[in-house]
Image: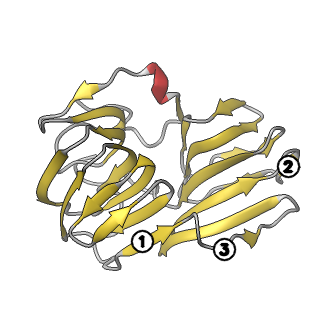
Amino acid sequence: MQINSDISRRVVIEPSTLPWVAATLTGVQMRTLEGGPEPATRATAIVKLAPGAIIENCTRDLGEEIVVLDGVLTDQFGSYGKGCYVKIPPGSAHACESAAGCMLFVKRHHLEAHDHRRIVVDSTVMPWYQGLVDGLSVMPLAEFGTRHTALVRWSPGTRFNPHRHYGGEEIYVLEGVFEDEYGRYPAGTWIRSPHMSAHCPYSIEGCTILVKTGHLLQQETGA
C-alpha cells in the first residue's frame, strides 16, 4: 500500500497522530509519512528501534538519509547520537542496530543514482552560518544537483520573504513551531510542498527545521 506518493500534492502530517506499525524486523516500528513498507520504494518514515534491535545488511538502490531524533544508532562505520545526519549513497550496503533503542527520521530512495558521497554530520558540534535574513541560521548537510538538505534555525520573531521552491520543498520540524500563511506546525510536523509551490514562512516562537529542496521534480520509478 502506497501513502502520499503523489508528489504533485501538498501534504502536512503530525506523525504523533499516526499509529506505530510493526515492521517485518523484530523490534522495529514505523510511522509511514509517504511511500510504503517495500524496501525498494521511495519512502519517508519515523522509525523506532527497540533496545537491541538489529537491521540486517540491505542495499538501497537510490540511497538513504537518516536523522537521529533520539538515542544512538550504530552501523559498521560508527555510532550516531541525537542530532546526527547520515547520508548512505545509492547502491551501498548498510546494516545497523541500537543497543539502548533510538528514534529516526528516515528517507529512502530519494537520491540521484550517481550521487556516491557518504556524509555524516553531527549537528551538535558543527557551526551554524548566517542565513539570508536576520534571525536565520543555516547548517548545510548535503547537496547534489538541484537537491539540497540543511538544518535551518529560526530565532523567535524571524520572518522570511515570499518565495517559490524549484523542485519542491520538504520540512520536518525538529524543535519549536514553524509557521506560514497556510498554518502553524509544531515540533514533529512533516510538510511536503510540490514543485514551484510558494509560501511566506516565519516563526513567532522560534524553531529548528530539517529542510530538503529540489528533489520533487519528477516521480521516480517505484514511488
Quarter where residue 213 is shown = bottom right
**Where residue 46 sits: x, y (%)?**
38, 39
Kindly identify the residue that appears in the image at 37 percent across and 59 percent down. 65
Which class describes the residues within 10 Å of circle 2: few (<14), some (14-19), or many (20+)? some
Q: Residues within 10 Å of mark 1 (few under 14, many from 20)?
A: some
- Up-down relation of residue 85 to residue 162 (above or below): below
The total of numbered circles placed on residues is 3
Residue type for callout 2: Arg
Q: Nearer the viewer, residue 114 or 39?
A: 39
Report, in whole angstroms, how far the alpha carbon at label 1 lies from the one at label 3.
Answer: 14 Å
Q: Amino acid at mark 1?
A: Val
Task: Left or right? Give the position of 89 relative to 193.
Answer: left
Q: Which residue is mark 3?
A: 127
Q: Secondary structure at mark 2?
A: strand
Residue 138 position within the rendered picture, expressed as x and y whole percent measured from the top left: 69, 65
Q: Identify the image's colour scheme: rainbow, by chain, secondary structure or one colour.
A: secondary structure
Disc 1, disc 2: CB below 8 Å? no
Residue 216 image offset from top left, x and y in percent? 46, 54
Judge whether 219 appears above or below 74 on screen: above
Q: Decide which of tag 1 and tag 3 comes sooner along the chain.
A: 1
Q: In whole angstroms, how far apart are the C-alphas of marks 3 and 2?
A: 22 Å
Label whose residue precedes the other's in the sequence (1 or 2)? 1
Q: In this image, 210 relative to 64: left or right? A: right
Q: Residue drawn at (74%, 37%), measured in percent from left and top?
A: 179
In the rendered image, is residue 66 in sight? yes
Dividing the picture into quadrants, the one containing residue 1 is top left
Q: Nearer the viewer, residue 49 or 141?
A: 49
Which residue is depicted at the point 63% across and 68% down? 139
Residue at mark 1: 120
Looking at the image, is mark 3 or mark 2 nearer the viewer?
Answer: 3
